[in-house]
Each structure stands twice: as C-alpha cells, then as structure tokens.
Amino acid sequence: MRKQRHVEYDECPIEGAMDIIGGKWKPSILFRLADGTKRFSELQRLLKTITQRTLTQQLRDLERDRMISRHVYAEVPPRVEYSLTERGRSLEPVLALLFRWGVDNVLAEKATEARQAPAPRRSADGPTSVGRSAKSRAAARPRAVKAER
C-alpha cells in the first residue's frame, strides 16, 4: 500500500504529484509506457532489476491513480496489457525533460569520470598487471632455461 504524506495537498501540489508518480519505479514505468502499450513481461524485461511483486504493486498504484489503464483479454492464458491514460499522457513532456536531464547530467558525468580514471598500469610481464595476483604474474613470466650439465 502506498504511503500518503498528507491527506490534503492545498499547500504544496508538488507533494501530491510526488505521491502519485514518486518513487524508484513509477517514473520508469510511465516512461516505458509512453512508447506504447506493453505487457507485464515486456515491462519486467525493460526494467531489468524490478521484482515481480514490486512491478505488480507499482502498476496497481498507477492504475488506482488513473495514470495507466489495464486491459485483460479473455484468452487462455490470459493476456494483460498496460497503457497510459490521458492523465498519464499529460506527464510525457515532464518525463521527456527528466530523460534529457539524465542524459545531460548523469550519463555525461559517468562518461567524464570514465575518461578521467587512471589507465591500468603496464608491467614487464604482460599488457597489464591490474587485478592479477603475484602468483599469476610470476607464472606468466618467461622461465629461465636451466643449463644442462
């Protein structure tokens, strides 16, 4: 069950909006549904690390708040599809801005950090010795040939 911060949002509509779309998964679910109707398994595949229980709960919350619609087909096995409602579609510009912000600030920052990371050390016993134990480095060194007597 969703935790509600306040009963009335007269003072701060941001709190009301965050109560409906806030959290780790709801914005991602809404963003994926902006591309079109998806089945449960498609959403689960797109959201890689979400658990089945969490996805089910988040979808129920979004449906209860009239952000998405759930359509069940009378088939065996049953087929269920989720899509954005008009209310949910009204968030598309906001989600697009969040996406752009993430690209510009989060992904760009990670790329900058990757470029600034120190290069692996070079050594005489191979292209890189980073992550190799002393024993494996010693095993990789050419062995001296014993002189025959």
Image (cartoon, rainbow, N blue to C red):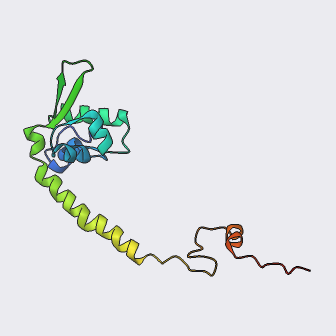
- Is residue 2 visible to us here? no
In the figure, residue 136 lies in which quadrant? bottom right
In the figure, residue 82 lies in which quadrant? top left
Q: Residue at x 11, y 54 (%)?
A: 93
Q: Is residue 49 above or below residue 128?
A: above
Relative to 49, is 103 on the left or the right?
A: left
- Is residue 27 visible to us here? yes
Q: Quadrant of the C terminus?
A: bottom right
Which residue appears farthest toward the right when viewing the image?
A: 149
Q: Residue at x 64, y 77 (%)?
A: 125
* Viewer-side residue, 3 vs 8: 3
Relative to 117, is 1 on the left or the right?
A: left
Q: Residue at x 16, y 59 (%)?
A: 97
Q: Is residue 106 above or below residue 88?
A: below
Q: Is residue 123 above or below residue 97?
A: below
How many callouts does the rendering have?
Answer: 0
Q: Residue at x 19, y 31 (%)?
A: 81
* Viewer-side residue, 13 vs 127: 127
Q: Is residue 75 above or below residue 17?
A: above
